[in-house]
Image (cartoon, grey):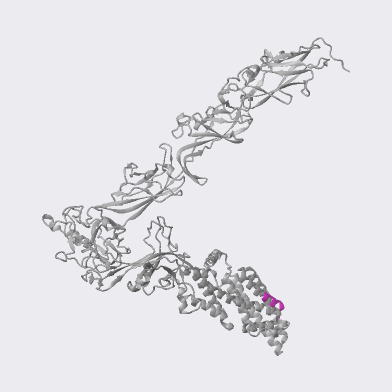
Amino acid sequence: MKRKYFSALLMGALTIASVSTFTSCKDYDDDIDNLQNQIKDLASADQLQQKVTELQGLITTNSTNIKDVQEAVKKAQAAAETAQTTATQKATLEDLKKLLAEGDYASKEYVNKADGIIEAALKALETGKVDPLVEAVKEAQAAADAAKTTADKAIEEAGNAGAALEKAQAAATAAQEAKDALAELQNSIGGGYSETTTVKDAITSIDVLLKADKTGLEGLDTRLKVIEDALKSGDDTTGLATRLNNIESALKNIIGQFSTMVTDVQLFNIAQPNYTGFNRTLNFVQAAEQANVFPAEANVADKQLKFEKGKYYAGEDSLLIRVSPVDAELTPGSISLLNSQGKELDDIIDVKEVHRYKELLYGNTRAGGVNSGLWVVKFKAKDLGDNFKAAAETEVYGQPRSILYAVAVKNTYNTTDKAEDASTRRVTSEYGIDLNTTPADPAWDFKVNERSVSWIHNRYVQTESIEQTDQITGWSAKNYAQELTWLDNNKPATKAILEGDDQNAVDRLGHTTGNWNDGVDNRQGYAILAVEKGQPITIDFGNTERQGIKGFYVTLDEKFAQESAPSELNAWNSYTYENVGYKNQPAKLFEGSKGTITIKDMNNVKGDVIGFRVHAVNYDGTLTDPDGRSFYVAVGDVKTTKNLGNSDLTWNETNNKFESTVVLPADFSSYDFDGYYTWQIAAADESGNTPNWNDFTVKYYAADGSEVPSLNNTVKSVKFILNNPMEFIDGATYNVTTTLTKSISTATAKVCTVNASFTKKMPTDAPTFNYREGFTENPEYIIPAGGTYSVLASGNKGGTFDLRNILIINNNTQWNGVDLFDEANAGVFTFNVAGGTYTNGNLDKAEATGWRYIMAVNNSGEQNLVDNSTERTIKANYNYFNISKRKENGSWITGNYLVPSTSSKKIVYCSWMKTFELDVNKTGMKWSDANKVTWKANPDPRGTKLLFSKLAVKVKDINLLPVKTGVNGSTMDTFFASNALAVVPGKYGEIWTTSTDGNQINPYFSAEIDATGITLKQISQTAIPSGVTGGKIKFTVKDCFGNVKPISLDFQIKSNGVDPARKH
């Protein structure tokens, strides 16, 4: 027994740890996290938290006992006799440890491994990490196996020795039980838990509690006590596993309960204007009953309501509250009204029902919805006499003042178990509710399928086929039907009296015979209400603070069934209804303000008009109307739904519209309809916009493909077209809907809802382009700004280039009917060149714009893009004008849509200087004939001028240049004269001379340059070597774009009879 207790205690520690702190199944991590977060968020609930803390203390106490056992195991050999004897559990465990520690066969390793598993279990309790515990169990298993082997060997060695054998057998039994317990632990942890500890089962159990209609809060004390009893029970080890299972089960239950406990309640803060129908005043109507039975005839309805003189009706009213957490569940028994002195109103006001508020809040209110934490609490007054008055108001300084109340939720735990303390355990709202009572006003209006009866047709003057119903004389008197009205609608009675001093009702008060406009309840001119066969027709009087009815029933409007009488009434009676009085069958009496009737079958009649009459009784037993109020419905077949599917809308370049690529099949031949509603977009798109009905068009086609002007039953297919494409998001799908209708008398019945969708598919096509015949990417000459090639005093010129000079688009043909070279279509096809523009120090793209596809090349400062060498890429976009709506950088934009061309070509920006060169050997104008200078002993200080007019030059591509002005001369002087070239100072100035090999500065002649030529001046007047016969003239020129070209010209030196210097 002792050894069993030791193993079981290990098992218990692990089991509690597994339930409380960790899972071994990864799949449930998120679920557990969510539950832990819920519990953490709810930990501020003082009273339940107090009890949970108490429970945790009990668990901690047991954990401490386990730890004490661990310490005792370590000290067992040295301090067994001094172990504490006051705790039976501990004494038992110490005996076990002492037994294990005695003898050679009691493996110290096994004891240490047992220590390890206890330590791991304790850490698992603290940290929730199971892996060390799993490993500890495995190691303990190995040690237990060794202990068992040792014990078995000891038995064998003991032979028949009594004491030794007994100890050996006891040790073997202990080792075997330890092995069994550890194996069970290993299976529980490593195998994903047993049925009693599986995390999945725990989550399922909690989920059920979260979704339960009733919270079972009243049973919380019982569930907590189960755990207390288990932990406080004696040390009967045979029941330990059962108690642990009970603990685990109760913990699961409490976790679920804890997560749905109300921790906060507030009166909902209703902003103005208030569309909710709720406020913070509980206003209970009251009515003194008059003696009456409703209906008066017992066979009219399935039961009767009895009213007794002297009795009072006490009404109901509701509050809208908000609770936290949103998943909390409320019950009528958990709610009360509480004043600031802690007094409840249970003796005079009941909580009749509670339900979640699932309506959509709108206006200036904050949004609500399913599990929004909003609840409607309906209160019922039991006593509206003196007790109510005393609870509603008090006197302050001689003036009446309203007493304010809070909503109290009774779902916290009472720790004292005393009845007098139970009433003090509450979560309360703010104190803002006041009480009131008012006399009930008589009801009259009601709604039918959400439409006020005041706007639904009746036969006040005549039937739909013009049989008069208000004529009491003449030929139409045979169709006359009485329509009674109270003389004063504010003073209804229990029965109609039509004559004498007590008269209270009259036929058609205020009505002129035959007049369609006057008379109380004259609804002749309003439309008949369209309803569907087999669908409920809801009649709702509603309940305001001061008005309401006790009950009502519905019959056929028999006395007004005058069309081809009695054929119409016979037809009505041949149909079958639910909850309607007809053919001597009693109607259903609805107690309260709301009920439904149904037209179940019409014997295959395709639509008919049927009249119903509603008879109702007020709270006090008076009739809402002397003979009831009628309304007429047009009955059609049950509305169906037809789904057409999706249509891709692609761009049609011919008509510049997005339209269905393929028509949608849409066969309407089987539907009986004569009209349809305007097609509408069903919902707002991602941008929050809902396109209007006129932003798209629907076209209809017959079987032969011919267009049908409107939707009718000959239509076999439809097509959608976008009229305003910028109202629709690029690539988005829009659901559209219409409803087929059928006119039945003055009503419009809905036959079928037609649903479809379309997707805006953006175009992907763009024209291609290529070089014209004879043109390549290099060179392409740029026209300088202003059309002249003159060099600027500082900086470089930009230029332009007409891409149409070198490119053809779409093989020089129209593209989808558009002439892309026509100036009227400028901007439809736009070119750009990467790295083509220099703006603010950064290379960007040059975009061809304007009427002629002109591309700007903007040089800035000394930057030169027209460098005769850099290869750039021409790309192009086809521009679809005003068809796009898309999101860029977080904002919605509308406008043009660019589709890149699949073509791209290379281009090199070139200057005319690219093929500019000196023609020094030109026939008849050789430079060698004009480049001579004579060295003299007495030189001319003016020097010798070599004329540029004698220096021939040429531009090889002169015929390719778009503008030739200024660069079409044949001698150097013309280029300087037009300023097409300018000298650029170099390392040695504007111009310098060198030796013939160019390796050194010429010491004999210097040079000067102007627009007409070069002047060479003799430097040395001493001897000149005989071997010096010439030299080179060097200078650099640039063009208007900033391209530079070094010039090197030979010159000849002649001797004028002076002996050249001797060689030394």
Work out whether residue 291 can be spotted.
Answer: yes
Q: Position of residue 453 (x, y in %)?
A: 27, 58
Camera-nearest residue between 861 and 787: 861
Q: Left of 488 or right of it: where is 689? A: right
Q: Quadrant of residue 1057?
A: top right
> Residue 533, relative to residue 909: is it above or below?
below
Task: Report whether 894 appears left or right of 516.
Answer: right
Residue occupying the point 39% across, 60% down: 359
Where is residue 1011? Give x, y as percent.
Answer: 66, 17
In this rendering, is residue 490 above or below 817? below
| Residue 153 appears in the rendering | no
Residue ranking furthest to the left: 474
Between 571 and 520, which is closer to the camera in this rendering? Answer: 520
Farthest residue, direction right: 1064
Residue 767 belongs to magenta span? no
Q: Residue furthest top?
A: 1057
Could you tell me residue 569's position as x and y percent? 19, 61
Q: Measured along the vertical axis of the image, is residue 968 above or below residue 724?
A: above
Counting from the top left corner in percent of width and height, residue 1014 is at 70, 17
Drawn side of residue 1049 relative to residue 879, left or right:
right
Residue 1061 versus residue 509 in the image, above or below: above
Q: Quadrant of residue 171?
A: bottom right
Asked if the magenta segment contains residue 112, the reply would be yes
Question: Quarter holding the C terminus?
Answer: top right
Residue found farthest to the front: 397
| Range drawn in magenta | 106-115
Q: Quadrant of residue 108?
A: bottom right
